[in-house]
Image (spheres, grey):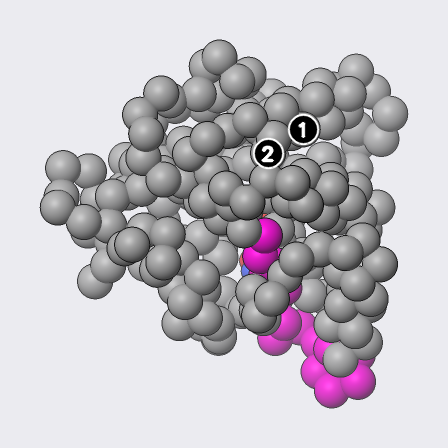
Amino acid sequence: ALVKDVRFVTGGVSMGTLPTDPLPEVAFVGRSNVGKSSLVNMVLGRRALAYTSKTPGKTQQYNYFLINEGRDEGVFHLVDMPGLGYAQADSKKRKEWVRFFGEYVRQRQQLRLFVHLIDGEIGLLDTDLEIMKLAAEVSKDECRWQYALILTKVDKRKGKAKANVYASVMDAVEKFGCDIGDRIIQTSARTKLGRADAWRLLRPVVLP
Ligand code: GDP
């Protein structure tokens, strides 16, 4: 297995409170209930994110997990980033979220891969468009990290409905000018679809 060990490190609440180690990092962002814990647990092969994203009040934290600590290779940070919840439409929390998010994607030197999760059952939400827009903007002049999209829960939709979700996501990618390449994958934590594809994204980052 590529992942031997996972340890929760810290929950960062601002740029100054993130780990200072120079380890490469992969960030997963998505609003609550998008299927982030299930997806990350599927990719890592264990229940790493079982608790953190569920803790009320801690949803604004960037939760850092150290993968393969002390090993010769495959050592990296996985960052579980909060999305914007439905309840935070125009609050102070929302402003804080936008500011921290902007600073993180612009300034975080360790960031290599930024994985945006979209619910494959529901499709794009306003908060997804906001993330895409900012990611596209920032990645135009920063080439430290790559942008990737994961559609979760694709087992929940079939045929035309599934194709429509995919097409609307690709429309948005085009509209915002996101540099996505072939880094868009469809996953299901239920059927384990897309696990190898997810590793195709992660491998160059964690095993350079
Ligand atoms: P998080 O809040 O983003 O961490 O989301 P969870 O991983 O906790 O998933 C939210 C809900 O969606 C749970 O009820 C999961 O069982 C369900 N879910 C997550 N992934 C899948 C999937 O791939 N297929 C289906 N059918 N349900 C899923």
Q: Amino acid at mark 1?
A: Gly
At horizontal 80% and vertical 48% (from top left) the residue drawn is 129
Q: Which mark is residue 102?
A: 1
Residue 119 in picture, x, y percent from top left? 68, 59
Dot 2 crowding, Cα within 10 Å, few <14, some 14–19, many 20+: some
Classify residue 194 as left or right of residue 47: right
**Secondary structure found at label 1:** helix
> Mark 2 and mark 1 in contact (Cβ < 8 Å)?
yes
Part of the protein shown in magenta:
147-162
The quadrant where ligand 1 appears is: bottom right
* Near-viewer residue (155 or 137): 137
Question: Is 153 included in the stretch rendered in magenta?
Answer: yes
Residue 29 in picture, x, y percent from top left? 59, 43
Residue 26 in picture, x, y percent from top left? 44, 44
State the residue position of label 2. 105
At horizontal 79% and vertical 16% (from top left) the residue drawn is 92
At horizontal 55% and vertical 26% (from top left) the residue drawn is 107
Q: Amino acid at mark 2?
A: Val
Label 2 near ligand 1 (CB < 8 Å): no
At horizontal 79% and vertical 28% (from top left) the residue drawn is 88
